[in-house]
Structures are given as structure tokens and as C-alpha cells.
Image: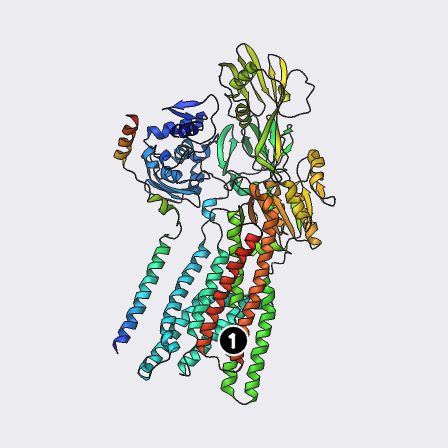
Amino acid sequence: MNILYFLICCSILMALIFLAAFFWASKTGQHDDVYTPGVRMLFDDEPERENSEEDHFSN
Amino acid sequence: MENQKNTAIKSVCFHCGEGLPKLKYQLDDKDFCCAGCKGVYKILSENNLCNYYAYNDNPGQRFNSESHLEYLDEEAIISQLIDYRQGSSSIITFYVPAIHCSSCIWLLEHLYKINTAIFSSRIDFLKKQVTINFNHEEISLRQLVETLIHIGYEPLISLQDVVKENQNVNNKSLIVKIAVAGFLMGNVMLFSFPEYFGLSGFEKQFQDLFGWLNLAFAIPAAFYCGRDYFVSAITSLKHKHINLDTPLALIIAVLFFRTAFEVIFKTGPGFADTLTGLIFLLLMGKWLRQRTYHHISFDRDYRSYFPIAVTVIIEGKEKPVALNEVKIGDRLWIRNGELVPADAILMKGDARMDMSFVTGESEPVHKVLGEIIYAGGRQAGEAIELEVIKPVSQSYLTGLWNNENYKSDKSKETFNDSVAKYFSLAVFITAFTSASYWAFTGDQHKAWSAFTAVIIVACPCVLALSTPFTLSAILSVFDKKGFYIKNTDAVEALAKCDTIIFDKTGTLTSSDTAEISFKGSLTYQEKMVLSSLMRNSTHPMSRHILQKLNPDQFYTVQDFIEIPGKGLSGTINGLAVYAGNLSLLRKQVNQSGSPGIHIVIDGQYMGVFSVKQQWRPDLNNLISGLKKSFQLQLLSGDTNKDEPFLKTIFPADAKLKFKQSPHEKLSAILALQQNKAQVMMLGDGLNDAGALKQSNFGIAITDNINSFTPGCDAILKGTSLSLLPAFIQLSKDGLKIIKISFAIAVAYNCVGIYFAVQGTLYPLIAAVLMPASTITIICFTTFTTGYFARKRKLK
């Protein structure tokens, strides 16, 4: 059962890594704006496609 | 079906979505309501940015900007505005009120397509801010702002830098603490589980390890995460006063020391689980209480109304100077539509001051040479020269904010703080009685454990949580109905009010839906002639009249002259047409009493266009809903022309006062407060700002949530004004809910104390009782708030 000592260390270490990850995210401002990125990822910006769409309309 | 949809789309402006006038502007088969909208479309289509219109229908906003931007060339002002500068690149953040939909995000993040000197731009949608990284060697700050204005997104640059004041450092440290507390709680729970289920002999070898680990986790929980409670308790004790943090700090300390004692002397598992859980929940409650609206600022003062710079005449030359560098004796050059930033004497020019900011009066005031013009007046007319007699910070209007006695005598004691005293006292008496009982019977160990257990179990945790949970639930009900309260503490202040004071202009009347009426008669031909004249002017009044006339043809105008703030004249089809105020008319007119836009065609007086203020709908219901339980008053800066009408809706005992200066409004509220009244003030403009700040609960009424409102406790949409009685009722219900949940908490505590006084409180009971009571309270507050909201028809 001595393996438990090792597992306990692992579990604390894992939790610490997650805590550190949260701090990092918080520090780099990832929680500052939780709305805009969700909208931003829905934009598609391919200039070629825009042109082809315009052509399609004018024909 | 398809056809119908098309006509529906066609009848509005492609850019801004407003209704089209009969004579519309056209480009690329698209219809526009005005030259401005067409101009924006042209820029976007030239830069291949028409995707802007793909994400939303008619995403644009109508605008008309005549800002003078010379000040953006001044190095001193640039360095104040810029966030960061290195090499050739600069970063700047603007507050752009026009941001309102996903198309705005798309367009403002593609600024680099319009100008290659812009490297990148990022939007924070909720804060309506755009951060732009640009090459300042290729494009000046002024050109950058001009680019933004050209596409309809004028940034708001004011003396109070909205962008920089928003950075909330305090909140960030709380979030870090919550994260740490959550981490500690999770781990401690994990190591406490074996203890809950009972340990077999074989697992006993881990007991010590778990105990020590728990103790190790309890140290940061108590002294890092819980540090604020100790600080707050010590400061309040120093002031010989007990607040809710005092018993909380005591409990945290007792929990920690008992845990340390039990672990070190191997007498038990300790209460680390209760301790970390308690701190985590307390911090969550605190976070809920501090949460506020990012996108609405409640702390604005005169500085957000004032520009950042003003034109000063130095040795005959105009030069933009930062406002805080303006000295007594400086000569200011104020153009049409600009704000006078400091008290000054009129030296040159014809001043027609729109003092609605300062006094609430709707008509412009004529000032003669040598007269003092107070800061806050807006020039409506030709450019004038002024000499500053008082620095900006000491002017008449800004003096409202430097008033020393603001809220000084206001008792900020909340229900929590008043209960905390009695609560702490009761807990101490119980703890000491039980401890002395066991000490008397000679059981030292039991005396110590009973003493600590009572304190642990009587935790006012629920008290600290029920308030933020209930009040934040109420806040979210309110904000769906257009009522935005600053924070949860303000809800308690709202519930306690017994006197309500209204402002008139902009509060009981609506500033958006002014109705234009014409006294006199015009033939079709005359209407078309007049519209042709109006079309050449960008003055809002001309646009309103144009909209009303809705012409279907235009003639060419010759000799067009616009005298700012006075009127327009021109020759159309050989007819001399004049539109404007009376002062320019050569001959006397009988109806000289009525202000407005007077029309003269070919020497003949045709009539007058006047703007009628529109009362908000449902005023009758609002007042009759409030008059039973509140004392009502009206303080208006305007003349008493509406007194007869107001008398019919206000109850007979309500005081109606007119021609009140901002300072008189403020002192009226002070006088009421000295008579122990809890005053609620409803106002809109800068002229109410002092009164709003002094009142116990200040509500700023606005027709557009994004426009500027003076500093206040809450912002109410004009359309929701009639719901005010229901809002007040719900806030009272909220206090009731808090009291009931306090009773529930006491019931739980009694169960705990039953075990505690016997000295037999096992950690498991404490660990179960606390979350159980917390969950009960959270569910109870959420459900009852929902119930009351439905009852008050707010949901």
C-alpha cells in the first residue's frame, strides 16, 4: 500500500498544475473578456470567397 | 412572399436601418437615408469590407460628427492617451459607444484593411473598447481617430479616461484567492473522506499523514485566503464597532487553532474540511457582492462630460491645450456645439448658451459681452472668445463634486452588520456558559472542546451568503427589465427609501421622442422649397423638420447661408427663404412669444416649427402607484410652464418646485435627510448630478443605456420607469427573504449547538451541517426571489 504515498503526491501535484494553469490564464487576461472571442471565432475571412459570392449575386 | 420581404428590406436604410425619406440616396442599388450612411457604405465597399452587412441587417448607426480633432496633434495630449509606445508602433485603447453588434466587432477588427498603418485591432465587446496597434510614423493619432469617425465609430475621448479607470485590480486578487481556496478545499475534502467513512486498522497508518496534509492546507486557507476577514475585524474593533467580519474572523481563527491542536497532539482529525469549505463559500459570496456591470459606469462625474482639450488663443494663434493646463486669464476659443469647460467671461462674439447641462432649462440663453458664463454651457452659434476666471476644477458646476458633506452622515449599516452584533454576543454567551459548566464539573478537556465547538457551529456563514445570493438574484431580475443597480448593497438602500424626488426634463419627459409641430400653413410647393433649404444643413433641428416634411423632390438653393445657432437662408426658385429664430427677422411678428424655428418665405411670415416635449407614457400609473407609500416631490430646473399639468398627476401634498439650480436641488435633499428621510432621487443630466450623489439612492434615467449618465446608484431605462413601484416592492421582498433565511440558519445552528455544548461535536457533523445549511439557503433564496418576482410581474 506504500504506493498510496506516491499517488497522493501525484494528486497534489496535478492539482497544483491546474491551479498554476488557472493563474496563468488569469494573468494573461483570458478571463477579462469572455464574450468577444466567442463571436470572433464565427467570422470567416477569406477574400476569395467574398469575391465569388459577389460574382454569384451579380450574375 | 419573397417579394414582400424585399419591399420590407427596401423601405429602410441599408446602412442604419432607419426609415427612408421619399427622396433617398442611392449607391450600388442600395438605398440610404442620408449622405453620412452612404459615405460609410462607400468607404466599406471600396475597401472590400461589405461583410459588415452580412452578419447583421442594417448594422450601422446614424451619426453626425463635427468634432474638432486638432488637439490630437499635441504631443502632450497624445502621451496621455497612448497606453504603450515602442519603436514605430503605438497601442491605444478607445471607448467607442457605437459598438453594439457582431458586425461592429468584425469591422473594427478589420481596420487594417482600410489603412495598412494599422497593425491590428481588438475589441472588448462588453466594455465597448477597441485596442488598436498602429504605426505612428505612418498615421497620426488624429488620422486614426478620423478613420474611425469616417466609418461611423467615433471614439469618446473625455477628461475622465473611461478606459483607464475601469481596470479593476481589486477584483483580480479576489479571484486568485477563490481559486486557491477552491484548490485547498478540494484537496482537504479528498483527504478527509477516509475519516468520514471510518478507517480500518490497516488504513490507520495514513491517518497522521492526512492530518498533517490537512493542516498544511489549512494554513494558506486561513492566513492567505481569509486574511481580509482578520484585517476587517481588527479595524472594526479599533473603531469599537462589530461588523459581520468580526465573528467570521473569530471562527476562522478558532477552527484553525483547534485543527492545529488536534493534529499536533493526535487527539482527532481536526476541522480543516469545515475551515476550507467555509472560506471558499465566504469568498464566493464576497465575489457575488462585488460583481457589477462591466459595461456600465456608475462613477462618472463632470470629467466624462468635458473634452480632454480646449482651443486656447495664444498670441493671436489657436492652439489646443489639455484641459488641466488651462489657467486663469487664458483666452478660450469656443466653437458652435462646444462646451465651456471653466467659468469664464465673454470677451468677443455672440453667445447663445445651451445651459441644459447645468440648469436643465431647455431654451438657449443669450449672453452679452462681459457676462460670466458658467462651465457646462454649450455654445449654439458662432465661435466666441472667453477669458477664464476660475480653473476647471473650481468652477461653479465642478464645485458640486467637491462638496465635502457628501453622504458623510449617511448610515451605511446593512442588516448584516446590525445583526452581527447580537449574533456575536449570543454566541459568546453560549460558548462561555457551556465552557464554564464543563470546567465547573471538572472536565477541562470537554470545556475547551465545547467552547470551540460552539463557536465553530454557530458560524454566521449563512448570513454572509444569503444576502449576496438573494440580492444578486434580484439584480438579475432587475437588469432584464432595464434597471441596472450598482451593486448588491445598493438594493438594501433602495428598499429603505421613503421619499422620492423627480426631476422633470429628461426624467418625466422623454428626450428621444420630441414631437415637432407646425403652427401655420404651408402649401405643397412651399414645403418642397423649405425642404430644399433644410437639406443643406446638418443641424439636428433641420433634420427633424426634413423628416417631418418628407419631401419627394428638391430644388437647387442659391446664396445659401447658415448662421450657426440662429438660422438658414437662401434663394430657391427666385424665392428668398429664411428659417430660424426671431432675432434675425427684420420685421416684428405677432407670435414672437413662441420659441422655435420661424419660417419666412418671400418676405411673408409662414409660421413656426416648435418642439414639444413628450411626457413619458404611464406617468399617471407611476405616480398613483407610488403616492400611497412615498412622499413625492418634483425639483425642476425648468420654468413652471408645465405646473398645471403636473398638478393633475401628482397628489395634492406633493411639493413641486421649479427653476431650481443644481445647488438648490442638492440642498433640498440635504434638508430632507436632516429630517431623517431616506431620499431617492430620479434625474438625468449633469444638473442633477449633485442631488443624485447626495441622495440615499440616486437613479439616473436614460433612453440609451450607452449614453453618459451622471454618477449614481442605479441606471433605469426610460421605458421601464413605470415599473419603478414593482422594483421597490421586490427590493423590500428581498430584505424579507434575507430575514427568513436568517431564521432558517438559526434553526440549523441550534441543532449544531445541541451537540456542541455537550462537547461531543464530531468533525463529520460540522462538515455535514455547514454545506447542508448553505445549500438550503441558496435554494431557498433563489426560489423565493423567483416567486416574488413573478408576483410583482417582473418575470
Q: Quadrant of residue B13?
A: top left
Inspect the image, locate mark 1, and give the three-letter code of the amino acid beneath it.
Gly
Q: Residue at x 28, y 32 (%)?
A: A53
Front position in the image: B561 or B244: B244
Q: Is residue B673 above or below residue B345?
A: below
Q: Is residue B276 visible?
A: yes
Name the spot of residue B545 as percent of width and height, x first.
55, 24
From the viewer's perspective, is B386 left or right of B109?
Answer: right
Q: Secondary structure at mark 1?
A: helix
Q: Residue at x 59, y 30 (%)?
A: B515
Q: Is residue B724 above or below residue B766?
A: above
Front position in the image: B195 or B412: B195
Q: Residue at x 41, y 83 (%)?
A: B265
Q: Is residue B243 visible?
A: no
Q: Provide the residue designation for mark 1.
A: B752
Q: Is residue B765 above or below residue B541?
A: below
Residue at the extreme front of the image, as rendered: B1
